[in-house]
Amino acid sequence: MSAAAAAMSAAAAAAAAAGGRGLKSVSRAAFSWKPTGRAQQTLAAAVSRSGVGLHSGARATATLLPARAGEGRYFVVEEARVAAEAGNAEPQSPLCTTLRSGSGSGGARVRTVEHLLSAMEALGVDNCRVEVSGGDEIPLLDGSAQEWVEAIRGAGLCAAEDISGQKLEKLAPKIDEPVYLRKDDCFVAAFPSSQIHITYGIDFPKAPAIGCQWFNTFLDADIYSSKIAPARTFCIFEEVEKMRGAGLIKGGSLENAMVCSMSGGWLNPPLRFDDEPCRHKILDLIGDFSLLARNGSQGFPIAHIVAYKAGHSLHTSFLHHLSGKTSVDQATLA
């Protein structure tokens, strides 16, 4: 049995078991914080990158600065601080992950944070101040996380210290029991595991060049840098005008996204990987799941995460439920 088939079987078995004992809400009981034996880290030097924002089309700059232990990762936009935490993620943010400070629509926001957060989470940047200028969107760069990896490695990492000059131990969330969230035929599931393991599936039947893809991987900084970070964002050519009519992807181009036609295949080959779209979904997942972090902890849980056709909204909804931030609508559970 293939790894993808095994993962699907495991998810189906968990759903069947849950159905047998009654639907159960995702809750805090599903995970616990575990010491890692490592000190929290931050950047050894400041580094910045500039480019257009995917949706705004405006040129913006993100400057990454060292932060104290316990501060975690946060953005500063229009002089307002927006913490990179699940509670600040907007539940319905089309085609990107948007963070907003405070409640309602009046707080400061920062958009398209997932690629940068993905790189910081995978490379172990636990505490970082990100100053955003030129708008409220993180630069898209080439549509992947590769340039962020290069920037972080160029700056280097060091142990972070708090205001008293003390180092703090890094904690990591560990899944203790199977949990899952489903909407229609899309789902995210987490199973107990001794290490981080990710299985992701996508299906685009109307675009045969993409079709159904699965990618299965363990996760560390080297695997991420070589197998995940270079994967670029993508879109369907026939949907571009509709998205632009909705005020989205004004900064998208053939230079920063892969574009696939339903009938003609890829418009800007070559791909970096045969399954580059699926790998990019894992890149997004890592960035979104990094929002589980608080106070310099690790965000991505120690678990086997299995996702199928999930996307940003389902990723962040799963985190909200896992953190006990919102109640679970029973109709959305398998």
Image (tube, rainbow, N blue to C red):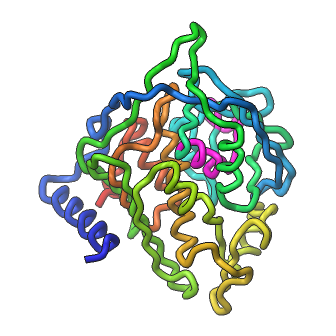
Span shown in magenta: 100-121
Answer yes or no: is residue 307 visible: no
The stretch drawn in magenta includes residue 102: yes
Is residue 17 toward the left or the right of residue 1 in the image? left
The stretch drawn in magenta includes residue 27: no
Decide: is 141 above or below 101.
below
Is residue 238 toward the left or the right of residue 226 in the image? right
The quarter of the picture where residue 175 lies is top left
Question: Residue 140, percent across and down?
Answer: 74, 55
Answer yes or no: is residue 296 visible: yes
Is residue 32 toward the left or the right of residue 109 in the image? left
Closer to the camera, 15 or 121?
121
Quarter the N terminus occupies:
bottom left
Number of disc labels: 0
Residue at x-position 30% and y-position 75%:
2
Closer to the camera, 257 or 204?
257
Question: Residue 254, percent across and down?
Answer: 78, 73
Quarter the C terminus occupies:
bottom left
Question: Residue 209, percent across and down?
Answer: 58, 86
Decide: is 154 above or below 305.
above
Residue at x-position 42% and y-position 36%:
325
Residue at x-position 46% and y-position 76%:
213
Question: Residue 3, percent across and down?
Answer: 32, 70
Decide: is 279 above or below 148.
below
Is residue 323 toward the left or the right of residue 145 in the image? left
Determine the residue located farthest toward the left in the rendered image.
20
Residue at x-position 57% and y-position 71%:
277
Determine the residue located farthest toward the bottom in the rendered image.
263
The quarter of the picture where residue 215 lies is bottom left
